[in-house]
Amino acid sequence: MSRPPWLIVPAAGSGRRMDADRPKQYLPLAGRTVMWHTLRRLHSVFPGARLCLCLDEADACFDPSSVPFAHWQRVAGGAERADSVRNALEWIAGQEEDDQALVFVHDVARPCVSPEDLRHLYAALAEDAVGGLLAAPVADTMKRDDGQGRVAATEERAGLWHALTPQGFRLGVLRQALDAARRAELPSTDEASAVEATGLSPRLVFGRRDNLKITHPDDLVLAEQILAAQASCSLSPAGEEAD
Ligand code: CTP
Ligand code: MG
């Protein structure tokens, strides 16, 4: 790997939909925390990367020993995910002169991302002027509701993808896009949508469907099963790569 990407891990959410006694990134998963697994997955593929971790300023659960990276920085979270990512980008821009540097953003709530997908995304974006994201084609028939619990329409499934993370973009492209989205008050739940709004087309990179975002309580059980299944297929980062 020539130069590892910068890594941003937004972890300043409160996990409202999990309805737990602490933010979901600190809930136990296979004997560790969700955050521990997520950071370890990233580190297994990008051990020399510099990490920017977005944390709520009032976070009382964070344990620095769960961070396996030699070079990492804590930055304050913002009101929305995009605000947290923008804070991280501002910090990176103060360290990095090259606005073509590649920046990967990965949700702390996705501990099952496979090392293979991370390598594949990195390879696919290495020469891409814009950037892109891991994504999985939609498999189910898609329904739109009428707001009253009944089907209003069946949507065309062909060409639809689930947007996953990491999403990786050139530093300059991403800063500009998130700044523009804020000025225009565009809601952006991922980086790609902000980049799309500038007229650019992020690259879709095929990703595994088991890159689950832990969102609701039963997702934790599912994530544990996915990790176990991946370990039995030797997908877990058992042997960490050399720097
Ligand atoms: N996130 C963040 N800053 C925020 C909101 C979210 O860094 N102000 C992070 C979360 O920690 C998570 C990722 O963005 O890693 C995706 O957000 P989501 O799954 O929505 O997590 P939460 O916002 O924590 O959950 P909820 O929406 O259920 O409250
Ligand atoms: Mg949220």
Image (cartoon, rainbow, N blue to C red):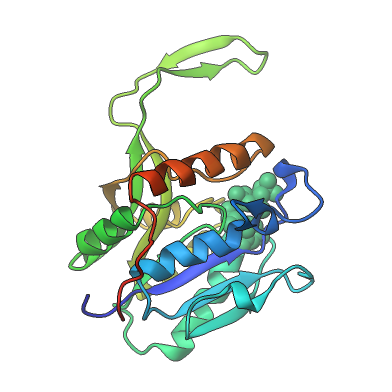
Judged from this view, the residue extending furthest toward the front is 232
Q: Give the quadrant of the N terminus.
A: bottom left
Residue 123 position in % (x across, y down): 21, 63
Res 80 seen here: no
- Relative to 156, say whether 239 is above or below: below
- Relative to 20, say whether 216 is above or below: above
Residue drawn at (39%, 55%), measured in percent from left and top?
236
Image quadrant assignment for residue 101: bottom left
- Relative to 90, say whether 147 is above or below: above
Residue 199 position in % (x across, y down): 32, 54
Residue drawn at (47%, 85%), measured in percent from left and top?
70
Q: Tell whether 150 sits left or right of 49.
A: right
Residue 221 position in % (x across, y down): 61, 38
Image quadrant assignment for residue 43: bottom left
Tell which of 22 and 32 is nearer to you. Answer: 32
Tell which of 6 and 34 is nearer to you. Answer: 34
- Relative to 38, say whether 154 is above or below: above
Q: Tell whether 22 sits left or right of 150.
A: right
Residue drawn at (44%, 90%), measured in percent from left and top?
95
Q: Tell whether 82 sits left or right of 130.
A: right
Image quadrant assignment for residue 182: bottom right
Residue 99 position in % (x across, y down): 33, 80
